């Protein structure tokens, strides 16, 4: 059995969203609020009182991204309406994925869910972090008993649902590029 998930929550909102609406949407999308490692949103909402009240109360950091950065991320549910109003095809899904990427990588596990003036999406961080010191030697690929790593151009890709956090890849890595997350 693997370690519990660590989550990044992407938030999109209208101006004037109430903290109660954010809490409601968050509780609906994330069964275990303690699993939230970070929040992420578009930079123009970094000072939105309803969002900030929830984020400060929870205690996880907030990552903010420009509309241009968010628009570079492929998402399952892009929106022309969001692009018209915000300048990006996605806020919640793209922010969750960008936040996860900045924390070592992750996958969207809860696509955008709309609440009252708020949208929530959730990405799970991968259990392994493979740093840029990886030489793609393949030792971890040959060692992993669960086949949770696959070849990729610069460093192996993690198949998070297969990883049991056994640590075999960490032990075999000649460059110490692999770290098990302390989830």
Image: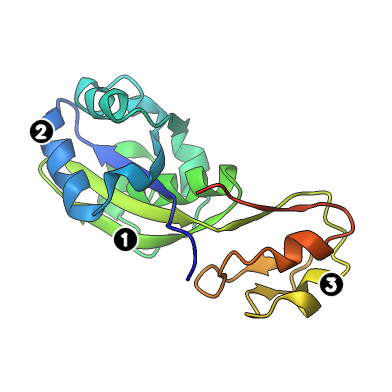
**Near-viewer residue (114 or 149):** 149
**Near-viewer residue (130 or 153):** 130
Q: Residues within 10 Å of mark 2 (few under 14, many from 20)?
A: some
Q: Residue at x 32, y 27 (%)?
A: 45
Compare marks 1 and 2 and give the one earlier in the sequence.
2
Camera sees residue 54: yes
Q: Residues within 10 Å of mark 3 (few under 14, many from 20)?
A: some
Which residue is disc 3 drawn over?
A: 138
Mark 2 or mark 3: which is in front? 3
Horizontal side of 25 relative to 46 (left or right) equals left
Residue 169 lies, with reference to residue 87, above or below; the image says: below
Mark 1 or mark 3: which is in front? 3
User: Which type of secondary structure does the marked residue at label 3 adopt?
Assistant: loop
Q: Position of residue 119 (x, y in %)?
A: 23, 46
Which residue is disc 2 drawn over?
A: 20
Compare marks 2 and 3 and give the one earlier in the sequence.
2
Horizontal side of 105 relative to 179 (left or right) equals left
Which mark, by number, is residue 50? Answer: none
Q: CA distance from mark 1 to mark 3?
A: 33 Å
Which residue is disc 1 drawn over?
A: 111
Horizontal side of 179 relative to 137 (left or right) equals left
Specify the quadrant of the image occupied by residue 117.
top left
Q: Position of residue 136 (x, y in %)?
A: 84, 65
Q: Residues within 10 Å of mark 1 (few under 14, many from 20)?
A: some
Q: CA distance from mark 2 to mark 3?
A: 49 Å
Compare marks 1 and 3 and give the one earlier in the sequence.
1
User: Which type of secondary structure does the marked residue at label 2 adopt?
Assistant: helix
Q: Residue at x 26, y 25 (%)?
A: 57
Q: Position of residue 127 (x, y in %)?
A: 56, 58
Q: How is the image coloured?
A: rainbow
Camera sees residue 154: no
């Amino acid at each position: 059995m693997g370690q519990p998930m660590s989550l990044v929550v992407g938030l999109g909102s209208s101006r004037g969203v109430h903290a109660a609406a954010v809490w409601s949407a968050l509780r609906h999308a994330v069964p275990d609020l303690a699993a939230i490692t970070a929040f992420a949103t578009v930079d123009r909402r970094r000072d939105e009182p309803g969002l900030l009240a929830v984020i400060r109360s929870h205690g996880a950091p907030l990552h903010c991204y420009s509309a241009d950065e968010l628009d570079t991320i492929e998402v399952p549910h892009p929106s022309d309406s969001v692009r018209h109003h915000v300048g990006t095809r996605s806020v919640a899904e793209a922010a969750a994925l960008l936040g996860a990427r900045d924390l070592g990588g992750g996958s969207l596990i809860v696509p955008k869910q709309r609440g009252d003036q708020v949208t929530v999406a959730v990405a799970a961080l991968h259990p392994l972090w493979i740093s840029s010191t990886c030489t793609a030697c393949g030792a971890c690929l040959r060692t992993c008993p669960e086949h949770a790593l696959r070849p990729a151009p610069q460093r192996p890709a993690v198949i998070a649902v297969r990883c049991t956090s056994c640590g075999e890849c960490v032990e075999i890595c000649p460059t110490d590029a692999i770290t098990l997350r302390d989830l």
